Image (tube, rainbow, N blue to C red):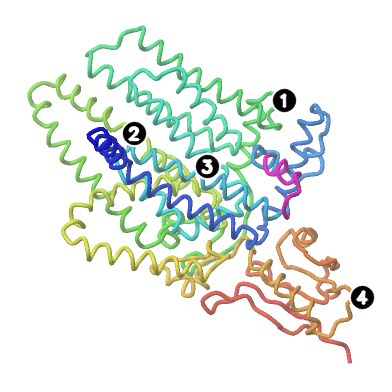
Amino acid sequence: MQARRGLFQRWGDRTASIDAELMLTAAVLGAALVVGLATASDYGLSVDEFNTDDYGPKALAWYTSGFADRSHFETVEFSLWYYGPWFQMLTAAIQALDFADRVTIRHAMTFLVGLAGIAALVPIGRIAVGRWVGLTALTLCLITGYLYGNLFFAPIDVPFLAAMTWATLAILIMTRRVLPSWRASILTGLSTGLAIATRTGGIITHAYLLAAMALCVVKCWGRERRLPLRYVFAMAARYGAVVTVAWITAIALWPWLQIGNPLGQFKIALVHFATITASFEFSHWGERVWTDALPRSYIPGQLLARLPEAFLFLLVAGVVAGIISAIASLRELADPWRAERRVGVAATAALLARERAILVVVLAVVLPLGFLIVQRATIYDGVRHILFVIPMLAVIAGAGLRALLPVLRRAPIVSAAAVGAYAASTLVALVALHPLEYVAMNAFAGGTRGAYDKFELDYWSLAATEALRRLERRVDHDSLGRAPEAPPRILVCIPWRENFIGTILHRPWIVETDPQKADFIIETQRSRCAENQSVVLIDEVKRFDRTFAWVYARQPEN
């Protein structure tokens, strides 16, 4: 009996020791995984997916042919050369198994990679701040409609988000020790190389790493009051190893770097995106702005409109808590500085080194956003180009919740009810928007309904696919009286992609590019190509009483 009691006691201790945060994280990720995979087929093909779906198989052929098949340099839209194709090749390889619709596989793969990327926020939050921060960051990302929706159909921005998040995690793990291990250094090289091999902006991870390692050096100096030459050489060797492995990885995964001097080829791609000439007008907070002449407030303004209210509230709380903590630390440092400058310097160095993880997270927000704002870079399509920064903002917001926990615990029932009500209302709104979750706007922008004319919402033209599916079902039932032996001619108004919409057709219809010859025309927010045509409106795709796609049928001739 005593032995049995001891067995149950040990089992109880083991059960009690299970980390509640990890259990909840597993539950959240599991639920997101099930919902995401179950609904992947609901999403339409976005503008960029038409060409990346062509890029993937041809880039893969470059390798499988022994570097002889140059079709992806010759028959693919040229600007795609300047993006690394590892994700597109991976997707093409899975699509080749032919176990599901190509578009569904692409969306499932994009979602899986994106979910794996934001899952890395859990250890990032723990390392940088503490318990529950990572789970909070993960949850905030999943309830951010703009981010969640893009997880399915942003074929370059989502893999870049994942690669940047993994690289940041690797840097934090590597620099937890004052002298990083070689294993962690190699891992960081691989992950930062993957980021570079996704988009040229991945090179910024070298700056993150340099800052983190500099703080390790600061800690060593503060602890020993000197910097042993052997330690300096060891740190330099590790940084050099990371950079070397990163570039070997990038060159191996990116064909563009393989057909010339890799650094020269990289510079061509970098300059292309730094000086991109795309210029068109769109709405931003009700004003008309140009992509190449954006106000410096554009990025903050877009985030203010697209991030959920709770996200923004906790983000402000995190920033305020950080400022208060910094002021308190400065006060503590006042006495050492008054006593002796050297002691003050050592105390300051120790403080900075101790907080190096959260400082790297802050740097991963401030450095890219600051650069783009100061440069006044050409940005369009909302803020999809900085999608990778949102997870880092979520970590800071998670720190805000951690700072508020003592206050929330004073009224646990009220706090739980408020959080539950907000979460429920947010989920209801996202369900109502599905599969257009990415057009979700917060209350500051008037919600999706109020923001409709003030912002560019469905810039991916996703509503066109939903309109097309509804039209297919309608024609199947012959509600328009069309003979089945005469396949209709259809024009889908997706800018620069009208020729390629055969990819999303589920019927043997004829793709048309001339609106005067089309039997059916589907208009999108970005392209209203049915104007001045003899057509009649037969259907609309609406969300919150706002139209995102229009379906027109040609009027029969008398």
Which residue position is annotated with label 4?
A: 485
- Rendered residue at 58%/25% (across/down): 247
Q: Is residue 119 magenta?
A: no
Q: Amino acid at mark 2?
A: Ala
Q: Earlier in the sequence, mark 4 or mark 2?
A: 2
Q: Does residue 182 sit above or below 20 in this rendering?
A: above
Q: Earlier in the sequence, mark 1 or mark 2?
A: 1
Is residue 63 in view? yes
Give the residue at the far bottom of this rendering: 558
Tell me where residue 189 appears, x and y as whole percent.
52, 25
Q: Amino acid at mark 4?
A: Glu
Which circle marks residue 162 in the picture?
A: 3
Tell me where residue 502 appears, x and y as whole percent.
80, 61
State the image quarter where residue 334 is shown: top left
Asked if the residue at tag 2 contacts the one at tag 4, i.e. Cβ–Cβ closer than 8 Å, the answer is no
**Mark 4: few, some, or many residues within 10 Å (few <14, many ≥20)?**
few
Mark 4–mark 3 distance (CA, rounded to whole Å): 47 Å
Determine whether, in the image, residue 480 is placed left or right of residue 222: right
**Mark 1: few, some, or many residues within 10 Å (few <14, many ≥20)?**
few
Asked if the residue at tag 4 contacts the one at tag 1, i.e. Cβ–Cβ closer than 8 Å, the answer is no
Q: Earlier in the sequence, mark 3 or mark 1?
A: 3
Q: Earlier in the sequence, mark 4 or mark 3?
A: 3
**Mark 3: few, some, or many residues within 10 Å (few <14, many ≥20)?**
many
Q: Which residues are magenta?
A: 90-101
Which residue position is annotated with label 2?
A: 357
Mark 1–mark 2 distance (CA, rounded to whole Å): 37 Å
Asked if the residue at tag 3 contacts the one at tag 2, i.e. Cβ–Cβ closer than 8 Å, the answer is no
